[in-house]
Image (cartoon, rainbow, N blue to C red):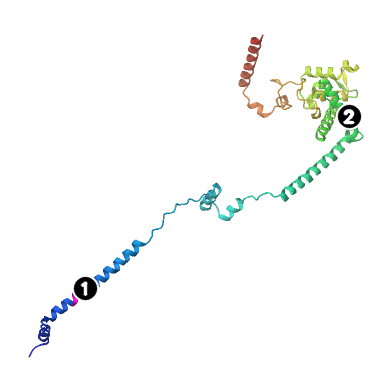
Amino acid sequence: MLTDNEGLYQMIHITHSGVTVEEMLFKLAITIYQSSFEGLMKKSFMKKEQTSFKSEPEPQPRLKPILSIGDKHDNKVKRIGPHIEIFQVFRKRSKLITRKTISMIISMQAYIRGWLERKRFQRILVKALYHGPNLREVIDMYRRLIHRVKYRLGLWRTRQIIDFTELEEWMDRKKFYETMFAKREDWQGLQRSELLKFFHDCSHYPTQQQIDEVWDLVHREDREKYSSLIKKSNAIEMLFTLYPPQGAHVQNNKQLKSTWLRPIVNGEEGYKYIVNGHPILKRANIRIVGDLVCRSMRERKMREHYLS
């Protein structure tokens, strides 16, 4: 009796038309392998063809973003700066000014300027009552003084244009001079020898020679030329002749000259700082000043020597 393995082995060796079952199975396996291999090759070939026929996109030029200086600064500050809300509040761009805004600005300026001029005119009216009965009389007095000052200084163009600022400056100075004169005068007047001290009280520091020259100009055709007493009107007249008011428009005053000991800068006398002992003068090195003065004197003498 045969076992199962032996029967199976005999069945495998049964021939069919002279071909064994082993050969048939081997051929079948080969055909299946070939068909599967050909299918795989076809699929891979088709994928390659599809990929090869795809059009490649043309390379486009890279556009660099054009940023302004403000944008760069904004981006930088947004990255490392303060909080974005705080930054935007302080970096808010100003809007264009419209016609309506311009008209509002003009009307506001006109209103403020008109208010300032009215206040100035009211202030001048109050100050004019100290110098005369009304404003017209004070203006006539001011014009006559300007005419006399210009005539004494050799200025023939005596045309005058009344400016409230210059008129107020003259009234303030006149009141200040009269107050200083009242402190020094006696029952008859002021002595001529006290003129220098009176000028110092009025914050002016001329030399005695300049005072004598102004005395001759003011008293040119006056009987009081040789008098030793000075009235208030004459003393104030001398002050305004030596130091003309702004309304006279004296550009080059020959009576006052800027020197080393008495410099004049922008119409202001520097000698008062020396007399009053200004603290800035204490830090000056006298050697440097002496060298500067000696060099200037040497240059002036050499220039005069070569010109002569």
Q: Which residues are magenta?
A: 28-34
As helix, strand or loop, the secondary structure at mark 1 comes to helix
Q: Residue at x 11, y 86 (%)?
A: 7
Q: Give the crowd class for mark 2: few <14, some 14-19, many >=20 residues within 10 Å.
A: few
Q: Which residue is mark 2?
A: 141
Q: Give the crowd class for mark 1: few <14, some 14-19, many >=20 residues within 10 Å.
A: few
**Image quadrant for the N terminus?**
bottom left
Residue 273: which quarter of the image?
A: top right
- What residue occupies the far right of the structure in this picture? 133
Q: Amino acid at mark 2?
A: Met
Question: What is the magenta segment's predominant secondary structure?
Answer: helix
- What residue occupies the far left of the structure in this picture? 1
As helix, strand or loop, the secondary structure at mark 2 comes to helix
Q: Amino acid at mark 1?
A: Tyr
- What residue occupies the far bottom of the structure in this picture? 1
**Image quadrant for the C terminus?**
top right
Q: Which residue is mark 1?
A: 33
x then y, percent, for residue 292: 62, 19
Q: Is residue 298 left or right of residue 242?
A: left
Q: Is residue 197 inside the magenta stretch? A: no
